[in-house]
Image (spheres, rainbow, N blue to C red):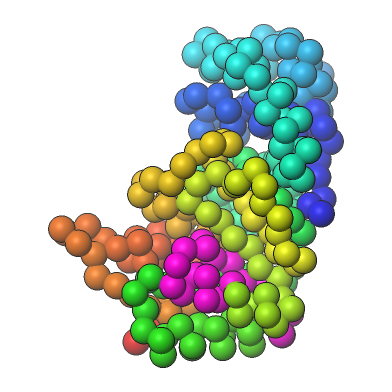
Amino acid sequence: MITTSSTGRQFLYLVLLLSNGIGPVAVERIIRNVHTTDLSEDELGELFIQGIIPTRIGLSPLHLRSVADAIDNGALRTFHNLLLSGQRIICPYDAVLPDHYWERAHLNRLPKIFIGCGEAPPTDAHWQAIIGSRSASQQSLDRAAERARDHVQSGGVIVSGGAAGVDTTALRAAHQAGGWTVCVPSASLVSDLKPQPRELHISPYPPMTTFAPGLAMARNGIIASLATDIVVAHVAPGRDGRPSGTQDAIQRANKIGVPMTVWE
């Protein structure tokens, strides 16, 4: 299972995840504010469990209202349901994800709070993302599967989004080879998710968040930032002047500075 933070710390960050308008920048500011008080993140979370929101952590009036609403609207019940289903909160800078993700998240305003389920892979391994379009040829799919098998057999981790086509092909091949995988869906984790051994699922979205194209595009930045490097197995063209999902992922990876190989 995932190595977790304390109950109080997990609840603190679940509340922030459920609070409207509190994004990565605000989360970072709250972390800094807490560290300048006599409270720890764990202690603050325990106060949240009791319905107490200290004013000295520097929440703006708008964020204060959002946090109060999240607590009043059943955050504790949501938390208990997540724990019962085997899911946990991955808090900012937890060792569940590699250091390079947290560094990139800080620089690029990426999510710092996730809901996760499954086993956490070794963070010092080579995390390789294998991505590509849903319409990839069988030759591209076979090549992606071969790369995934070779990578996990050498001790690496495969990262993907779990979409049809290249994503699922790479993940399936890695599982069949007994390797570690990380899947980042473009929605929240389903409540009855039962990961296979050596499989981690993470989502930056609150429970009951359904698929939307914008979420799928945003997820591309997370996958790129988790990866030590990226292999693009197939690139489909976009439509109506907009980039395809794979093209968007390439653009985000280039912006972040992740090494990448694009197959012809």
Q: Is residue 155 above or below residue 238?
A: below
- Residue at horizontal 66 percent and vertical 23 percent from the top: 75
Using the rendered image of the protein, determine whether residue 8 is visible from the camera's viewpoint: yes
Residue 58 pos. (x, y %):
62, 16
Residue 195 pos. (x, y %):
71, 59
- Residue at horizontal 60 percent and vertical 46 percent from the top: 190
Q: Is residue 228 above or below residue 209?
A: below
Q: Which residues are magenta?
A: 153-171
Residue 213 pos. (x, y %):
35, 49
Please say whether residue 258 is one of the residues in the magenta stretch: no
Using the rendered image of the protein, determine whether residue 225 is visible from the camera's viewpoint: no
Taking 21 as reference, is 43 left or right?
Answer: right
Taking 218 as reference, is 66 left or right?
Answer: right
Q: Nearer the viewer, residue 190 or 22?
A: 190
- Residue at horizontal 55 percent and vertical 44 percent from the top: 188
Q: Nearer the viewer, residue 97 or 68?
A: 68
Please say whether residue 168 is one of the residues in the magenta stretch: yes
- Residue at horizontal 64 percent and vertical 87 percent from the top: 150
